Image (tube, coloured by chain):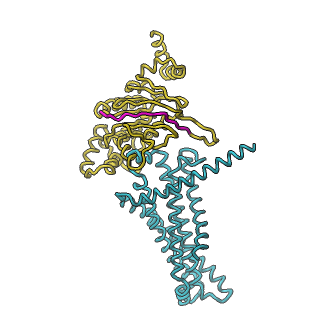
Chain colours: A yellow, B cyan
Amino acid sequence: MSNMGIEFKNVEKSFFRDDGSEQVILDKVNFKIPAGKTTVVAGGSGQGKSVTLKLILGLMRADGGQIFVGGNDITMARGRTLKELRTKFGVLFQGSALFDSMTVFENVALPLRERTKKTDNEIKTQVLASLDQLELLGHENKFPAQLSGGMRKRVGLARALQLEPEIMLFDEPTAGLDPVMTLEIYQLFAQLQEQVGYTSIIVSHDIPKVFNLADQVMYLNHGSMDVFPSPDAMQWSQKPHIREFVKTTMGEIYQSHLVEQ
Amino acid sequence: MQPNIITRLGSTGLSTVTDLGRMGMYLLQMIQGCFRFPFRFSEFIRQMHFIGTGSLVVIFFTAASTGMVLGLQGYYSLNKFGAEGMLGSAVALTLIMELGPVLTAIMVAGRAGSAMCAELAIMRISEQIDALDCMAVDPFRYFISPKLLATMISVPLLTVLFDVVGIAGGYIAGVYLLGVNPGSYIDGMQTSVTNHDIWLGTVKSFVFALLIVWICTGRGYFVHVIKGAGFGARSVSKVTTQAVVYSSISVLVFDYLLTAILL
């Protein structure tokens, strides 16, 4: 199981809009993401959930504070150190981010070709095996534009898993998918996490379905991050903005649950 | 109202300085990317084919028509002084020192520069560049620096082609259509064009190539942070237009500066 946890210490991030006003995304935020577990990050649109992921990856720089990835401060990492830290990550992007001028096979083989010294035959065997695992065999010569949304997500997942990541980041993994496909993707996540044992961070709007996977839940709202040790703890929270969120996303059934308590 | 104007002025000033700094760093990274191992030779060849071979036809026709127009125009002017024997040197000097490098650069900016910009911008907004970063694959080494090298090699070669075709065009218009003596056309060219003139044209074409690839790929690469570019498809179209306009204008400005400094 992965031993790469993540810790935010007094992290600040804000943006300036075109009109010159400031939008605070993270306001001296502190939290820990436990290693080998699944953490779900929830929050309204435009609150900065994807920005939080980019900060973890070092794709964006924080305005202040420290972000520790497996004990290394990624805000201070540059060049080779940053490159080495990034090899620990696997990312499934919101729009899959597949290279649209490459076939499915080439997409999945890219990290192996670029980051390992494996021979073409070894790469072929490994890529075909993971395409088989994700039920994509027979589609390896297609281009991303010829695939459905769900298939693209699976290709993105196959690509992200090639270098055996210790931390997997999922940015809205089920956005734009139908309910059946959503369920399939979640089952796949649960299976893979069991097999690989990575630390998993899922940014999602898909509440409460995604809660089935969650060990810890975080809620980002106007620059502050509320951390709950379990989905249940979030549902029973008495904070007004959390109550409002739970009520909107999960409906009255959870309200009555609370009344019974 | 007054503070609002000052705020806007300050904000525009800040974003311009940020933009320039960003582009400066980008240029450095592009150059560094050329020296990172392993070099992607296949991507370099693909880009050479796209920028170089792909531009052959458009360069050929532009050069032929420019040369022929220069032949006609030059004959008309020189004839007034009875100096039509100088037509060869007039056409050759104009092409080698000015029109060859400038027109080649502008045609390449319009044809290949816009495509490079749009490609990078789409890769940026669909998070493909982020995906490369996340796999710890350097996007500069992987596909940006090969574009730099391919443009730096293709543009001077296309400029040579432009010069040759243009001079031939001038010859056709002058000798075959207007009856200028073929010997004086060739001889005038040989005696008046010096190595310095050719060197000036070559320096220009290298500088223009750098400007095109730097500005065009840079606009695409930074599509997500360029102030006022907007989002999605509209941002791609906006930065692509900017890329062609900015690179063409800088080619013209640098043409003047280089001529003034090196002539």
Name the one closer to the observer, A241 or B180: A241
Please indicate whether residue B177 sits to the left or right of residue A258 in the image: right
Residue drawn where x is 43% and y is 38% of the image: A56
- Where in the figure is residue B188, as x and y percent of width and height? 56, 87
Magenta span: chief secondary structure: strand
Q: Quadrant of residue A212?
A: top left
Q: Is residue A174 visible?
A: no
Identify whether A148 is placed above or below B114.
above
Quadrant in which the C terminus of chain A is drawn: top left
Residue lying furthest right in this view? B1
- Where in the figure is residue A214, as x and y percent of width and height? 39, 26
Name the one closer to the observer, B139 or B84: B139
- Where in the figure is residue A143, as x and y percent of width and height? 38, 47
Q: Is residue B121 visible?
A: yes
Please indicate whether residue A40 sits to the left or right of residue B111 in the image: left
- Report the span colored magenta: A1-14
